[in-house]
Image: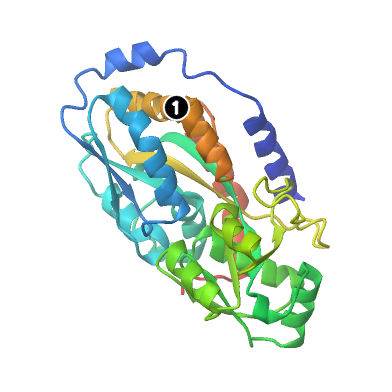
Amino acid sequence: MLIRRHVLQLAAALAAPAAVQPALAQSLGAGSAWPTRPVWMIVPFAAGGSTDVSARLLAPGMQQVLGQPVVIENRAGAGGTLGSDAVAKAEADGSTFLMGTISTHVLAVGLYRDRLPYDPQKDFVAVAPAVLVPICITVHPSLGVRTLAEFIALLRAHPGRYAYGTGGAGGSAHIAAVSFLNTIGAEATHVPYRGSAPMLNDLIAGQVVAGFDTPALIAPHHRSGVLRCLAIATDQHSTLMPEVPTAAEAGLPGYKAYSWFGVFAPAGTPPAIVDRMNAAVRAALADPATQQRLNEMEMPPIDQGSPAEFAAFLQRELDLWVPVVRASGATAD
């Protein structure tokens, strides 16, 4: 019930449109000396995944505000923690930012426990949220199941026989899968990949028979019949696959799984730079063409306002999901 209430509150916040920060001009003035050179945005996952795509969609709009190129660099590995740690240890001079996620800044706390090389709150400044991303449960047609109920029955009947893929150990899809298996009381083998794109390739090839990832990644292959999406793990239907039921409609009420992406800077980054980057992200999200593209990819923009509001949002997510991860028994395998 806690997760359901949290998701409903988040959905309500997303449904309320917000104008671009009224103090945009003031923020720009405060940080007008920055940037004087290209800004690097580290994406801690492989190219082609939803985190990478969202960063590349936002980069042109951010560049218009900042007046300098925004260079996207992929540093994948360890569920996003390698690239995140690199940003945590980078110079706090406004040269380097991170497109962080629920995986790198929330789930990793529960998965790595004392082994996480950075503190998501102490080692970073929350700059601006970007997008929300639902997760869908998908199977290869060779599995022979057409509904979520049939998939659940198959997993229960054959503990440990089947393998599922995700975009990385400790990611939101991994936790979504672990939570799903715990909810239904079944076992399956996790095959982590270095990003969503290589996972999708093996899922299409039947090397793994199930996958947990975003509707945007799965939808074209679901429509062609190459893959079969069984359920969307939020309260809302997918606009890309409207015929696919929600998990509740498919017989699994209370099961929720989603991700979100947002921009972070190394701790100690000057407030004027943080404010200007916040304004740049929000301006990019407010662009109608960018909004349309994000919505087409089922990644609706989040507008939680100021860096302080984003930091408060992060705290709520930590309070919600870290206990869930630890109770699940999942580890960063």
Q: Residue furthest left?
A: 36
Residue at image point 27% right, 28% down:
270
Residue 232 lies in what quarter of the image? bottom right
Question: Can you give x and y, in whole percent of width and height, for residue 227 in the image?
Answer: 62, 68
Looking at the picture, tell me which residue is in the foreground, 286 or 333.
286
Q: Secondary structure at mark 1?
A: helix
Question: Can you give x and y, in whole percent of width and height, for residue 181 in the image?
Answer: 68, 72
Q: Is residue 327 visible?
A: no
Query: Does 179 sit left or right of 34 as displayed?
Result: right
Residue at image point 46% right, 29% down:
308
Question: Can you give x and y, in whole percent of width and height, for residue 66 in the image?
Answer: 28, 25
Specify the color scheme.
rainbow
Question: Can you give x and y, in whole percent of width and height, for residue 6 in the image?
Answer: 69, 43
The vertical placement of 9 against 250, above or below, is above
The vertical placement of 213 against 279, above or below, is below
Please name the amino acid that badge 1 sits on: Arg
Q: Residue furthest front?
A: 224
Residue at image point 40% right, 56% down:
48
Looking at the picture, tell me which residue is in the foreground, 294 or 45.
294
The local crowd at label 1, few if under 14, some if 14 to 19, many if 20 or more residues have their Cα within 10 Å, is: many
The vertical placement of 265 against 227, above or below, is above
Q: Is residue 168 visible?
A: yes
Q: How many marks?
A: 1
Query: Does 69 sit left or right of 119 as displayed?
Result: left
Looking at the picture, tell me which residue is in the foreground, 140 or 135.
140
Which residue in the protein does label 1 denote? 282
Residue at image point 52% right, 32% down:
291
Residue 215 lies in what quarter of the image? bottom right
